[in-house]
Amino acid sequence: MNISDFLSRVARVYGDKPAVSLGTTQLHTYSEFADRVQGLAGALRGKLGLGEGDRVGLAMLNTPQYLEILVACWHAGLCVVPMNSKLHPKEFAYIIDNAGVKVCFVTGNLIDGISESLEAIDGFERVLCVNDDAYEALLRHPPIEMVDVSETDPAWIFYTSGTTGQPKGATLTHRTLLGMTLRYYADVDQLSPEDTYFHTAPMSHADGLYAIPHLIKASHHVVPESGGFDVEEIFGLLETYKNATFMAAPTMLTRMTNHPKAGSAKSENIKTIYYGGAPMYLEDTKRALATFGPCLIQIFGQGESPNTGTSLSKQLHADYDNPKYEKRLSSVGLPRTGVEVRIVDEEDNEVPTGELGEIVLKSDVVMAGYWNNSEATSQAIRDGWLHTGDVGFLDQDGFLTLKDRSKDMIISGGTNIYPREIEEVLLLDSRLDEVSVVGRPEPDWGEEVVAFVVLREGETVTPEELEELCLNNIGRFKRPKEYFFVDELPKSNYGKILKTELRKQLAEK
């Protein structure tokens, strides 16, 4: 099998349908897209001399070329290694060396820094810029037939963010990507050529993975001219396109909700906003639903189980009359089709319903392992179960609620304190825009609770007011001992709040 085997069928049946646009400008129909893919695949195997299973890097901003490179590599029997475009050249070099990448496609803004850092890497052959004429010449190479590969062959190596050391390459096979796609249709949305997919998040991550179910159903792919998430641009695109789906990290969705134009946006043209990757607080979710209607789907997963763990469906977001509505809205939903979820203790024993522990997953969407890292693989996958490092619990109805990453848990006086619980309480105050709670070393108790707070524009709040709010809602031992009012919180390129950076800031104070 080959995850790209949809291409010829889609080109025959939906050849005149729009495939790729940049902003509001259509670039290629599906027939044209297929021609470009097959020509590029021919060049990869012929002109560039790559062999089956070779790895191809992508160090690129979101561009229309991203999609054709992904599909062309699979068509040619190659494996893609997409990388965050905001990495340092040394970080690019580490991944390219670790994965054994031979050829790397880049956007023009990155070529100088990357080229210098790759000169000494054994086996690396060339950097190709997608913005010049030489790239377009590759597309005119004689096409080749799709290479038939094994379902267990690597298709995508996804490198983790490296928050606990050097990044590790989660190896996703053709079967993994097909399993992810089928579960999209089962649990997220049905798609058709009438759908539009806005690439608002980095295509090296979940946004690019979810391009696959949209490509297979001949949906229209729109790359914003900004190359990413710009609230005004998204509202502008909604004036042109209907049945729009896009990804928004919780912080991005909150920015959309709070934007002055949110009330006048063409929300009826939004089909689905799927969010995840970080906690979405209850009050923020309620405001987003009130603004955009029941178009939200929450996805819980990670690179090692791409976009596929649990989901909170549109129907559950809109189940307003259910007596358990708020509890369920605070959860990450139910296990996806064919996915088993358990909560285990430190000895990997399953804990009773309602008790906290580590979340573990089992399905055919779990990675094959970490690339060339058997030790890390054996730590992450034990007896077929993927250990996520996330802490949570399952209720009696099977809904999974996240508490925190195990590394973010605060232990004070031997008691576990979960930052998200405190963050939820603080965000009951509508004057607060964002909050992040972390632990700070404390000689007598081990750790104490500290909160970083971003206020909405023009608002003022005192620590005493927040202290009273906490004392009225949670145990005294959980309340923050100090508040830091800041202009913004440090975030990753995917919109996740970087608690590691906040802890570093505390250590330097």
Image: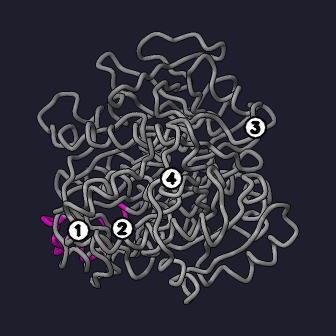
Q: Are marks 1 and 2 in contact (CB under 8 Å)?
A: yes
Residue 148 vs 68, above or below: the answer is above
What residue type is disc 2 on? Ala
Q: Nearer the viewer, residue 108 or 322?
A: 108
SS at circle 2:
helix
Q: Which residue is mark 2?
A: 34
What residue type is disc 4 on? Glu
- Which region of the structure is painted magenta? 253-269
The answer to which image quadrant residue 432 occupies is: bottom left
Q: Which residue is mark 3?
A: 373
Q: Nearer the viewer, residue 117 or 53?
A: 53
Q: Earlier in the sequence, mark 1 or mark 2?
A: 1
Q: Specify whether 508 is left or right of 470.
A: right
SS at circle 4:
helix
- 60 in the magenta segment: no
- 260 in the magenta segment: yes
Residue 361 vs 4, above or below: the answer is above
Q: Earlier in the sequence, mark 3 or mark 1?
A: 1
Q: Which residue is mark 1?
A: 15
What residue type is disc 3 on? Asn
Q: Earlier in the sequence, mark 4 or mark 1?
A: 1
Q: Residues within 10 Å of mark 2 (few under 14, many from 20)?
A: many
Q: How far is disc 4 from disc 3 in space, using C-alphas?
A: 50 Å
Q: Earlier in the sequence, mark 2 or mark 4?
A: 2
Q: Earlier in the sequence, mark 4 or mark 3?
A: 3
